[in-house]
Amino acid sequence: MRRLTIKHSAIAYILNREMGYTQSAIAKLMGVSQGTVSNMIKEFEYQREIRNLQKDLDDARAIIEKQKLLPQNEDYFC
């Protein structure tokens, strides 16, 4: 059985979402089942959302730090 990587998922995602390939056509190209392609695309979408949310959190932390909105002591959140 082939070991599929995140790169394979990204390729499947782009072929499907941006280039209009069907999941069946992608499956044939990659030598896997259509269900596998479906799962790859879903998992890639989840990972993409998670990473985007992480970037939003990192940006918010940077703004808080830059604006010196950090509490002066640890009792602030008690």
Image (tube, rainbow, N blue to C red):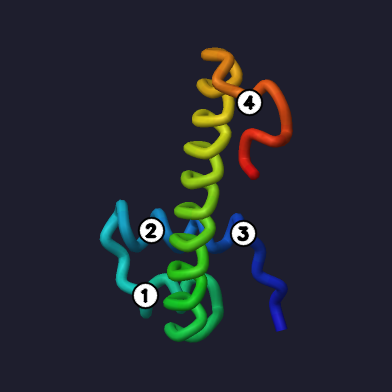
Cα distance in 3D space between marks 1 and 2: 9 Å
Q: Is residue 74 above or below residue 32?
A: above
Cα distance in 3D space between marks 1 and 3: 17 Å
Residue 6's mark? Answer: 3
Q: Residue at x 36, y 75 (%)?
A: 23
Choose between 30 and 37: the one closer to the eye.
37
Cα distance in 3D space between marks 4 and 2: 47 Å
The residue beneath circle 1 is 23
The residue beneath circle 4 is 71
Q: Residue at x 48, y 53 (%)?
A: 48
Q: Residue at x 26, y 60 (%)?
A: 20
Which of pointers 1 and 4 indicates the residue nearer the eye? 4
Q: Which amino acid, mark 4?
A: Pro
* Disc 4 + disc 2, Cβ < 8 Å: no
Which of pointers 4 and 2 indicates the residue nearer the eye? 4
Choose between 29 and 38: the one closer to the eye.
38
Specify the quadrant of the image occupied by residue 65.
top right
Cα distance in 3D space between marks 3 and 2: 14 Å
Identify the element where label 1 is drawn. helix
Side of 51 relative to 21 (left or right): right
Q: Which amino acid, mark 3?
A: Ile
Q: Residue furthest top?
A: 67
Local crowd size for mark 1, using a 10 Å CA cut-off: few (<14), some (14–19), many (≥20): many
Q: Which amino acid, mark 1?
A: Gln
Specify the quadrant of the image occupied by residue 68.
top right
* Disc 1 + disc 3, Cβ < 8 Å: no
